[in-house]
Image (cartoon, rainbow, N blue to C red):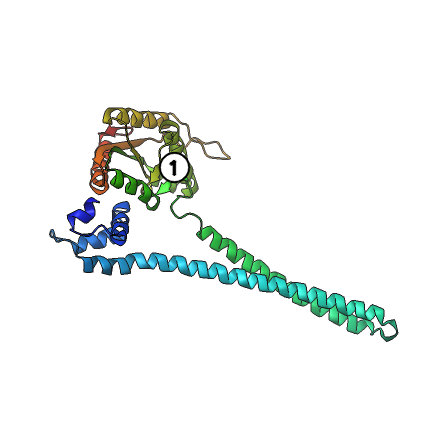
Amino acid sequence: MAFLESHHLQPTTANYAFALEVVSDLDGPLARAVALETDGGLRLTPRSLNELSQRFLATKSGTAARMEDAVQSHATQLGSLTSDAQLLTKSLSDDVTAMAVEVQDWPDSNALVARLTDAERELADLRRDVAKLQANLGSLSEQRTDPTRDTATQALTSEGARPLFARLGEQNRAYVMMIFSVADLSNINERFGHPVGDNVLSAFVANLRQVLKNEEIIRWTGNEFMVVVTDVALANARLLAEEVLAAFATRRLKLRGSGEWIGMVTGSAGIVVGQGADQAAALIQARAKLYRATIKGLGQVEA
């Protein structure tokens, strides 16, 4: 990878994972820390890389491990409570059966009512505990869903782009990187709420999938999406990007319930050609072109 070569670092598994983390989120905390560490043209030393890995990457794995432990603990408690409930009901059944057999020694009604009342209270407590644990498990399960996919658009996140970047680096192939942005998303969120903004993004992703079939779509930032294609010329990639933006601009997106049209929503795109493991440089260039396209006007493509 170009990142490792530029810093004269060995292409080990750990160093490769570190480089991918930096490249996949150039605005993230790790990338910013690397920029500070190398300010003035300094190279990243193995010692600095190790310290940054401990600060930023170890936290991720530790959080995941703690979440797994929490799920396991809650599951164990849930199993224990279920077993307690079964034992309690069996004990109550045995007591009543014994009373029925020994008719001549049948207790007074007050004793039986008291026993049943205690059992009902204990079962109610168990049910509450079980419900609470089930809710906690449900919450933890939601947190454990694939973190590499965006819940609103079902596109890959920048984290999920790692395998794609790894393949490009290993194959050393030429590619075309396209960065799209949806215009005025912050205003849409402010006027109609974030759920409407999420629906707008989902609609845009649907257009991307319709035109760029079988390509991985990556939600890079809040309103930006990346698509990397191989075996496609720059001119053809531009035509595809223009088709996506033109189709999206014609959609009349409406509010659910009232049917109110939210107004025309458009986008822009920046396109560059990259090679092999230089994704970081390609990404910077593509976003610069995206910015110029946005300045030119809505629905523009800069290549």
Vertical placement of residue 138 versus 187, above or below:
below
Query: Image quadrant of residue 152?
Result: top left
Secondary element type, mark 1: helix
User: Quarter of the image containing the C terminus?
Assistant: top left
**Is 69 left, or right, of 11 in this rendering?**
right
Vertical placement of residue 223 versus 21, above or below:
above
**Is 70 left, or right, of 235 in this rendering?**
right
User: Which one is nearer the viewer's eye here, 153 or 21?
Assistant: 21
Can you give x and y, in whole percent of width and height, for residue 70 in the image? 46, 61
Q: Residue extending furthest left?
A: 40
| Residue type (three-letter) at the residue carrying disc 1 | Leu
Query: Image quadrant of residue 265?
Result: top left
**Is 205 left, or right, of 128 in this rendering?**
left
User: Which one is nearer the viewer's eye here, 188 or 123?
Assistant: 123
Tag 1 residue: 201
What residue is drawn where x is 24% and y is 35%? 173
User: Quarter of the image containing the N terminus?
Assistant: top left
Vertical placement of residue 77 versus 1, above or below:
below
**Visible in this render: residue 121?**
yes
Can you give x and y, in whole percent of width and height, for residue 27 in the image? 26, 48
Dot 1: few (<14), some (14–19), or many (≥20) neighbours within 10 Å? many
User: Which one is nearer the viewer's eye here, 18 or 123?
Assistant: 18
**Visible in this render: residue 120?**
no
